[in-house]
Image (spheres, rainbow, N blue to C red):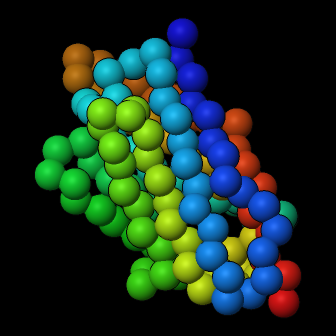
Amino acid sequence: QVHLVESGGGLVQAGGSLRLSCAASGFTFSRYAMSWYRQAPGKEREVVAVIISAGGITRYADSVKGRFTISRENAKNTVYLQMNNLQPEDTGVYSCNAEGVVPIRRVYWGQGTQVTVSS
């Protein structure tokens, strides 16, 4: 059974930092691209950061470049999102996503963790 469990969310003042973690189980973690998405109140869910399975290549939304860092520890089946200089517009529910394409495309989601940034 697949599980993606996020942790590390909370309330922080503008300019502060948080580190999100997503612990995965039930699939071959190292073979999956891992992403963090967020959904702000009244807005559509958007991708924040992606790290592919091989080579550690990363991609970020323009709004978080230079402030957020995605990383993964395959030995621990865990992906992280280090968020620095948080701003009120970063408020939302942050969800972990896993996507694999071999042999068939599979996508898994976590339940999400709330991040609230006060001004």
Q: Is residue 103 left or right of residue 73?
A: left
Q: How many circles with numbers are drawn on the protein?
A: 0
Q: Is residue 38 left or right of residue 68?
A: right
Name the image quarter holding the N terminus. top right
Name the image quarter holding the C terminus. bottom right
Q: Compared to 31, does 47 lie above or below?
A: below
Q: Is residue 47 visible?
A: no
**What residue is drawn where x is 57% and y is 23%?**
3
Q: Could you say which is closer to the camera, residue 29 or residue 18?
A: 18
- How far across and down, in percent of the image, does residue 30 sit? 27, 32
Q: Could you say which is closer to the camera, residue 93 or residue 71?
A: 71
**What residue is drawn where x is 44% and y is 46%?**
79
- How far across and down, in percent of the image, does residue 108 sit? 51, 29
Write down the quadrant of residue 49 in the picture: bottom left
- How far across and down, in percent of the image, does residue 65 sit? 43, 81
- How far across and down, in percent of the image, does residue 66 sit? 42, 84
**What residue is drawn where x is 50% and y is 60%?**
81
Question: Residue most toward the left?
Answer: 55
